[in-house]
Image (tube, rainbow, N blue to C red):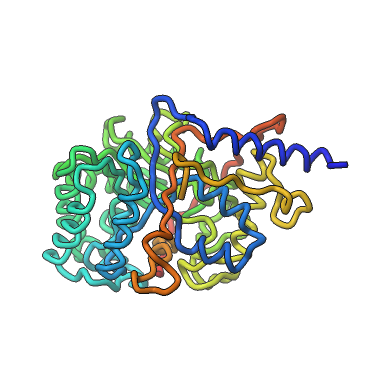
Amino acid sequence: MLSTRRLAAIVSYAAFALLSTSTRLVNAEDLCSIVPYSYTGAKSTHPELKTAIEMLENYAIASWFTDRQTPQERSDLMKGLLSQCSEDKRLSIVVYGIPNKDCAAGLSSGGSVTSASDYQAFLKELTDAVGDRKVLYVVEPDALGLLAQDGGCGANAGYLENLKVAVSTLSTNANAELYIDIGYWMLANGHSTGKVASAMKEIAGSGRVKGVTINTSNYRSNDECATYCSNFQTAVGSSDMTCIIDTSRNYNGSPTSDWCNVPMAGIGKPPTSETGVSNLDYFMWIKPPGESDGECATGGTSAGSFYLDGFKLLWDQGYFVREQGMPKIGDSSYSVIQAPAPSGDSSPTQDTSNQTTAMATEVPTSDSSSWSQEDIVATVAPAEPISTDVSVGNKPEPTARSGCKAKTRMRSL
């Protein structure tokens, strides 16, 4: 006879399967991307993770367009994204190619873009591919923070002018929404927030900027990040600029400024535009849950690679187990539940990573024997989160137990 927990999990998953094959969107908007390549390999290497990973594949994880990829890899990425995401969906793309990126740590400074002219060509490559499709751009992770912070290297690295170029170029598509990334620590006090606001006003004058992304590849709680967003709006003197939170690993918040494979982390609320908070436009998964921040003191694999132990912790301590009643990896009930096949409206994504924020696993080159264009699967973030709740009580999302300390993040790829 099935245990109560096991039965609830099976019923819960059955409810999800029904919802995932039906029309569940009314007015809100879907984000779309492609499944992280690291997930394909992980399901093959670690079949015990298949159920959990296939659940995550039903949500969009932002795709990274970066000069760390070859032109062919970027071309393959965009072809897959454009072919798999229907035109009524909004593409979600992280733009990461500013010259001298990661100027503080230098861990992600490599890439083909080394000059302003290179950057213009890089951006044109992207805008030519996207055309007039609906798209959400996360613009240059960490660049605004490194530009605005006291003594920041971004000023001498030319970030201000290049961010203006990025905003101007990406804004030529009337269907594009632009959010400039800013590290949460820059919004934690009035002085640094004021510097961010000053730089943002100047940059936004070059095009159309909707706001900022907060918590990229980090662990701060939604409540904490919503406060930072309010701080930002107060500093710019307007509620017109709004925010996005990366919820990929923030279910439990964080009482410290640790950023590297934090063992208490859990997968956060799924991507959606229905945030329930007026100044938050989206919850997004910008970093793929399960991709490592690097070889950290707490353990981990190389930055951007799939980290088995880290993924297990994220799943077991996160949203799907604690709020949706799904079993932990290894529970006896886990193996009997099969993830539903993604429907035509709900499929897979692609990248990010380390404390400046590591780029996601690179798309294999098109001549790889283990990968082809046909392997790309689209993933759609429901504008309203899929509910698998069947008599399983929801619990409030924990918030960070203490304020965060200002600390720059080191991005390694």
| Residue 97 in the image, given as x and y percentages of width and height | 26, 62
Residue 202 position (above or below residue 68):
above
Which corner quadrant of the image does residue 312 belong to? bottom right
Q: Residue extending furthest right? A: 1
- The residue lying toward the viewer, choosing from 62 and 301, is 62
Which corner quadrant of the image does residue 112 belong to? bottom left
Q: Is residue 45 left or right of residue 141?
A: right
| Residue 37 in the image, given as x and y percentages of width and height | 45, 62
Residue drawn where x is 52% and y is 55% of the image: 289
Res 277 seen here? yes
Q: Residue extending furthest left? A: 117
For the N terminus, give its image quadrant: top right
Residue drawn where x is 45% and y is 55% of the image: 35
Q: Is residue 274 left or right of residue 13?
A: left
Q: How many marks?
A: 0
| Residue 286 in the image, given as x and y percentages of width and height | 42, 51
Residue drawn where x is 59% and y is 45% of the image: 340
Residue drawn where x is 36% and y is 39% of the image: 243
Q: Residue extending furthest top? A: 26
- The residue lying toward the viewer, choosing from 221 and 112, is 112
| Residue 284 in the image, given as x and y percentages of width and height | 43, 44
Q: Is residue 123 left or right of residue 37?
A: left
Res 408 seen here? no
